Amino acid sequence: MRHENDHARDRDHDSEDQPVFIRQRYGTRWVYNHRNPAGLALIMIVPIIAIAALLLMTRGASR
């Protein structure tokens, strides 16, 4: 399925062939690719781990 908003370089690949990281459209940053299953899992798991780590750090600092 092709979307008119997608980059031309992203349209030619199936989700299995997509890289985990892709270059951001505007700029030089690399971001997780939501079309790759591993990239999508990282997008969903990393914020949960970060929030848990912050909560553990604030809990330990109050002692």
Image (cartoon, rainbow, N blue to C red):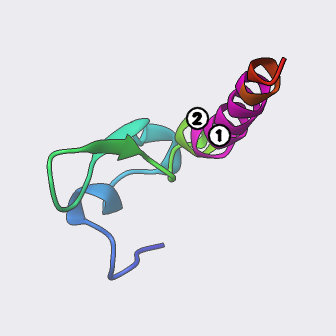
Q: Which residue lies furthest to the left in this view?
A: 27
In this view, the residue farthest toward the bottom is 4
- The residue carrying pointer 2 sits among few (fewer than 14), some (14 to 19) or many (20 or more) residues within 10 Å by Cα, namely some
Q: Residue 10, how many percent across, how many down?
A: 31, 57
Check residue 52 in the rendering and tell me which mark sits there, or answer none.
Answer: none
In the picture shown, does residue 53 fall above or below 38?
above
What residue lies at 43% left-to-right and 39% top-to-bottom? 17
Q: Which residue is drawn at 33% across and 79% down?
A: 5
- Where disc 1 sits, the SS reads helix
Position of residue 7 in the picture relative to residue 35 (left or right): left
Whole-number angstrom distance, CA of label 1 to CA of label 2: 5 Å
Q: Is residue 4 above or below residue 34?
A: below
Question: What is the secondary structure assignment of the residue under circle 2?
Answer: helix
Q: Any magenta on residue 51?
A: yes
Most foreground residue, 4 or 48: 48
**Three-letter amino acid code at the position of disc 2:** Ala
When asked about the image quadrant of residue 57, the answer is top right
Quadrant the C terminus occupies: top right
Tell me where residue 59 sits by quadrant. top right
Mark 1 and 2 residues: CB-CB less than 8 Å, in contact? yes
Please report the residue visible at 72 percent of the width from the left and 39 percent of the height from the top: 48
Quadrant of residue 3 in the image? bottom left
Residue 23 in picture, x, y percent from top left: 24, 46
Mark 1, other Cα within 10 Å: few <14 / some 14–19 / many ≥20:
few
Residue picked out by circle 1: 41
The residue that mark 2 highlights is 38
Q: Magenta segment, principal secondary structure?
A: helix
Amino acid tagged 1: Ala
Q: In this view, does 42 lie to the left or right of 8?
A: right
From the top left corner, tell me how far across and down residue 51 is, in percent: 70, 38
Please give the range of residues in magenta: 42-57
